[in-house]
Image: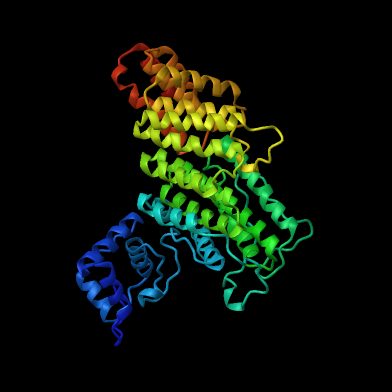
Amino acid sequence: MTERPAQRTPNRQLAALIAEAGFSNAGLARRVDQLGLEHGLDLRYDKTSVTRWLRGQQPRGTTPALIAEVFTRRLGRRLTAQDLGLDACAPVYAGLEFASTPEEAVDIVSGLWRKDSGSHAELRKIAFTPAGLVVPSRDWLIGRADEKVARGEPPAARIPAQGRAALRSPAEPGVPSLPRQRGQAERGPGQRVTAGDIAALRSVGELFRTLDDAYGGGHARQALVRYLEHECEPMLRGTYGEQTGRRLFAAAADLTRLAGWTSYDIAAHGLAQRYFVQALRLAQAAGDRTYGAYVLVTMSRQAVYLGHGREAVQLARVAQQGVGTSAPPVVQALLHSSEARGHGVLGEVRACTAALVRAERALETARPGDDVPHWAKFFDEAQLADEFGHCHRDLQQFRAAAQHAERSLQLRAPSYARSRLFCRVVLATARLGLGELDQACQLAAEAAGQAAEMRSVRAVEYVRDFERRLEPYKDAAPVRNYRDKVAALG
């Protein structure tokens, strides 16, 4: 690694923190290297590198942020590069930071949007790190809504160097043009944010949510990220009062979570994790505790998918603790069912069953007149049956899994195409577990055909998981027929 020329002043701040953390020079270097690997970086620092830092040399690039993150995890409090006596660098490596102020949150998330909208393919290869869930979820749980989010005219230094133009690039095939206020010029930082601007953000969220449900996260993800960069960031750097600012941060949190969700769907898991963390911080700025719990549930679902059951349970429980009993029954059902999914992955039958019962009871208390957040309206009887089906599949309780999966497919609207595909694979797996090979292969062939029409890595992985379960029956006629059908899909 190339370093800048040594400074004459020893770095006493770094020395003090190394002593407090109980690190050796070699131990610190090893942890920085390990954290770098989590984020796709091959750093190869050693004890000599740390000695140079202590003598006053400044590590280049993203390394100061990595070192700060190592100390943050060790000492349990948020530390920045400046706290370590190191030069600040743009927080581009991670996005796992839970910002201390709304202004810092905007800087971090806008940096993430800009890198993701560019040609930084390596960003989508960053690994998911379970350890990166601990600090943000804890900070959210003990944190409070920011006292002030209102903004006047921003200082000139805060205006990004590059101009912002809303989606100058041609629209992707099949992606509608995105809404802008009628008669409004392209927005620049410092302009006043209106209620119409926030309504437009909400409309964009619904548009991309619909596309994601029907066609998969890869269909329009890049268009969403460009929209965040070119439209949402200038609004966040604009002028707004407290009430408008809270609503603006809430809309930005929702769009950022959706960007993470679509990244998760294309298996960009490290990138998705960063979007979720930043959505959580934006939700805190919005003062929306319930939405923050929803973001944690989203993070829990990703952990389930990646096989991190313990982390999934912990995230769901933090979400429950964070909202208490104040959330609407539908949201409570969502939180408890997410915990159940984590227990299911871990094979914890009693804990899984208890969480499912709590979810079922919560949904039973929901009434048509309840004030349900727009993002929670998808959680209905069909979704609860889907959760039951997944849990029973994971627990190898195949008869119950089949019953709930069938019920979900009967109730689920066609517009939720990807969710229906997942449920169909769960049903196929249950039929296979019950020894009903013909039906299992028929259901899976239908799902494989649907997956081929989507841009969803998760959809493909669901089908592949079923195919792995077919291996013991590979010479059976239904399996050969299934493989022929899948091969014909091209």
User: Residue placed at 25% from the left, 77% from the top?
Assistant: 52
User: Residue placed at 29% from the left, 19% from the top?
Assistant: 472
User: Residue placed at 53% from the left, 54% from the top?
Assistant: 279
Extreme residue in the right direction: 183
User: Residue placed at 70% from the left, 68% from the top?
Assistant: 191
Image: 300 above or below 193: above
Horizontal side of residue 184 vs 215, given as left or right: right
Horizontal side of residue 262 vs 232, given as left or right: left
Extreme residue in the bottom direction: 8
What quarter of the picture does the C terminus occupy? top left
Q: Quadrant of residue 380?
A: top right
Image: 470 above or below 63: above
Of 129 and 171, the residue lying toward us: 129
Image: 115 above or below 214: below
Give the colouring mode of the picture: rainbow
The answer to whether residue 396 shows anywhere in this view is yes
- Residue 298 in percent (x, y) is at 50, 44
- Residue 216 in percent (x, y) is at 53, 38
Of 445 and 248, the residue lying toward us: 248
What quarter of the picture does the N terminus occupy? bottom left
- Residue 199 in percent (x, y) is at 71, 52
Image: 412 above or below 204: above
The answer to whether residue 169 shows anywhere in this view is no
Q: Quadrant of residue 92?
A: bottom left
Of 374 and 174, the residue lying toward us: 374
Horizontal side of residue 253 vs 351, given as left or right: right
